[in-house]
């Protein structure tokens, strides 16, 4: 069973004390973080916002992304084709998505 983390804001200072662990994140905000090359496989993000983050080459195998918003993020080389299809709903605003793959994904309202 995975831990559920709710209503948290993650910044560089917070991550020094409490790293991001595998679990379910609900209504959380991730601000100006370098999350590149991390492995978010089997995590779940629900109603979350990533703002100003570097997520380049992060692994999203079977990751749940439900109502997740990415704002001003660097997202190079991501494989969204590997995320969990269940409830998949993401939006992107002013993000760099070069070399990212959405192969065979049906995305609404993006």
Image (cartoon, rainbow, N blue to C red):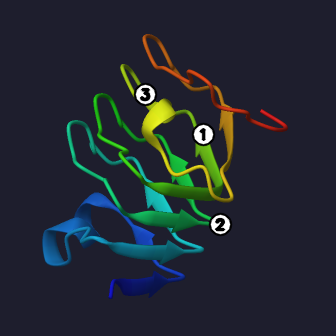
Depth order, front residue of 33/67: 67
Q: Position of residue 22 (x, y in %)?
A: 27, 70
Instruction: Spot the residue most to the top.
Output: 99
Mark 2, residues whose alpha carbon is within 10 Å: few (<14), some, or many (≥20)?
some
Q: Earlier in the sequence, mark 1 or mark 2?
A: 2
Q: Earlier in the sequence, mark 2 or mark 3?
A: 2
Q: Are marks 1 and 2 in contact (CB under 8 Å)?
A: no
Which residue lies under the disc numbered 1? 71
Mark 2 element type? loop
Which residue does the image show at 46% across and 12% down from the upper left? 98
- Classify 14 as above or below 64: below
Mark 3, residues whose alpha carbon is within 10 Å: few (<14), some, or many (≥20)?
many
Distance from disc 2 to disc 3, alpha carbons, whole Å, reads 19 Å
Which residue lies under the disc numbered 3? 75
Q: Position of residue 24 (x, y in %)?
A: 44, 75
Q: Quadrant of residue 1?
A: bottom left
- Classify 62 as above or below 59: below
Which residue lies under the disc numbered 2? 47
Quadrant (top left, top right, bottom left, bottom right) of the C terminus: top right
Q: Is residue 27 left or right of residue 34?
A: right
Q: Position of residue 87 (x, y in %)?
A: 68, 59
Mark 1 element type? strand
Q: Are marks 2 and 3 in contact (CB under 8 Å)?
A: no
Q: Is residue 99 left or right of residue 96?
A: left
Distance from disc 1 to disc 3, alpha carbons, whole Å, reads 11 Å
Of the two numbered discs 1 and 2 in the rendering, the one whose residue sits closer to the viewer: 2
């Amino acid at each position: 069973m995975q831990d559920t983390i709710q209503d948290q804001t993650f910044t560089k200072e917070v991550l020094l004390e409490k790293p991001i662990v595998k679990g379910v994140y609900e209504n959380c905000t991730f601000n100006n973080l370098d999350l590149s090359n991390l492995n978010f496989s089997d995590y779940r993000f629900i109603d979350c916002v990533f703002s100003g983050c570097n997520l380049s080459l992060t692994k999203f195998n079977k990751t749940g992304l439900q109502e997740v918003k990415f704002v001003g993020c660097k997202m190079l080389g991501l494989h969204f084709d590997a995320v969990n299809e269940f409830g998949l709903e993401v939006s992107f605003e002013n993000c760099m998505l070069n070399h990212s793959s959405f192969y065979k994904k049906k995305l609404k309202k993006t």
